[in-house]
Image: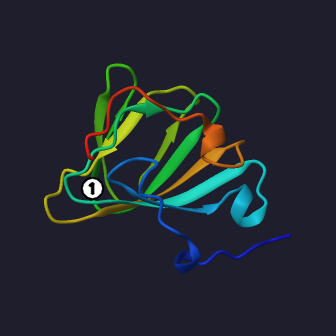
Amino acid sequence: MATIIKQEEIIPDLEYEKGLDIRIGINDASCGSSELTMGYTIVPPGVRNPAHFHPNAEAGFFILSGELKVYIGENRTMTTVKPGTFVFVPKGEIHGLENPSKTEAATLVFAYGNVPNKEASGTTFIEKPWVK
């Protein structure tokens, strides 16, 4: 059955990736999804998440606002992305992002394919959090 989930109904997850405000709207708990996890992330000014990968899920995100530096691969190739940009990350590919602005938060929508929740993606961090 189709489900409508309003942003104000979502509890922010501030622990999954320290420093980021992550709001997961679609997963097994919210609507019974078995193969899609989708959410919204607010990246505060100056925040960078630790490099990580998802061995069990492809990841994709769409930049809504702000500018982000996205790094991908073992050599952490950096690309600056702006609103309207899609980013696809295959299973197991190291990636992360940084908001270089000193004043403006950046926002994005993300999805993990073929998993019912973020835990099933198998997120594995390869460096310590930059934010405590």
Q: Is residue 126 above or below residue 103?
A: above
- Total marks drawn? 1
The answer to whether residue 103 is above or below residue 59 is below
Neighbour tally class for label 1: few under 14, some 14-19, many 20 plus, Cα within 10 Å: many
In terms of secondary structure, where does tag 1 sit? loop
Q: Residue 14: where, in percent of width, then height? A: 41, 57
- 114 horizontally vs 57: left or right: right
* Colour setting: rainbow
What is the x, y in percent for residue 45? Answer: 21, 58
In the drawing, does residue 26 fall left or right of residue 15?
right
- Relative placement, left or right, of 130 versus 22 is left
> In the image as oriented, which residue stretches furthest toward the right?
1
Residue at the extreme left of the image, as rendered: 102
Q: Look at the picture and state if 88 lies above or below 8.
A: above
Quarter of the figure with residue 97: top left
Quadrant location of the N terminus?
A: bottom right
Q: Residue at x 66, y 49 (%)?
A: 117
Q: Residue furthest top?
A: 74
| Relative image position of residue 13 (x, y in whole percent) | 47, 59
The residue identified by callout 1 is: 67
Q: In the rendered image of this protein, does residue 91 appear above or below residue 4?
A: above
Q: Quadrant of residue 122?
A: top right
User: x, y (%) of residue 7?
Assistant: 54, 75
Identified at 32% across, 32% down, the residue is 128
| Camera-side residue of 71 and 28 | 28
Q: Residue at x 75, y 65 (%)?
A: 31
| Amino acid type at image mark 1 | Glu
Foreground residue among 132 and 66: 132
